[in-house]
Image (cartoon, rainbow, N blue to C red):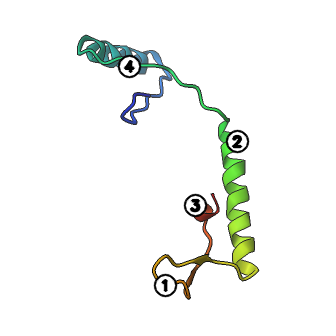
Amino acid sequence: MSGNGEAWTVKDSDTLQHFVAYVTARYEQGITYSIQRPNRTGRQNNAIHACLRRLARSLNEAGYGVAHPLKPELEIPYSESSVK
């Protein structure tokens, strides 16, 4: 994955050839790449997000909410993102 959010999945020799050609062309333009491994697995990531969704639902069911930034008397329900 490059710094601009591109991602490649190399699953056969055809996609491998396209990937190599792509990286080679960018290298010749002076663009460099580094490989970064994810910190957690997909299963771990899914588990974290499921936990955050459950926590948001529980907070909402318990009557808690996030204060609206412009109207403090209004509350916004918790979401997975706001729990993060």
Q: Mark 3 points at which residue?
A: 81
Mark 3 or mark 1: whose residue is earlier in sequence: 1
Which callout, 3 or 4, points to the residue nearer the camera?
A: 3
Q: How far apart are marks 3 and 4 (CA)?
A: 34 Å
Q: Which residue is drawn at 46% across and 19% down?
A: 34
Q: Name the residue under label 1.
A: 71
Residue 65 as seen in the image, left or right of residue 62: left
Pinpoint residue 60: horizontal percent, then vertical percent.
69, 77
Residue type at the position of mark 4: Phe
Q: How far apart are marks 2 and 1 (CA)?
A: 39 Å
Query: CB of mark 2 within 8 Å of CB of mark 1?
Result: no
Q: Distance between the residues labelled 3 and 2?
A: 19 Å
The 10 Å Cα crowd at callout 3, few under 14, some 14 to 19, many 20 or more, is few
Which callout, 3 or 1, points to the residue nearer the camera?
A: 1
Residue 43: numbered disc? 2
Q: Decide which of 21, 58 is in the foreground and name it.
A: 58
Q: Mark 4 points at which residue?
A: 19
Residue type at the position of mark 1: Lys
Residue type at the position of mark 2: Arg
Pinpoint residue 53: horizontal percent, then vertical percent.
67, 63
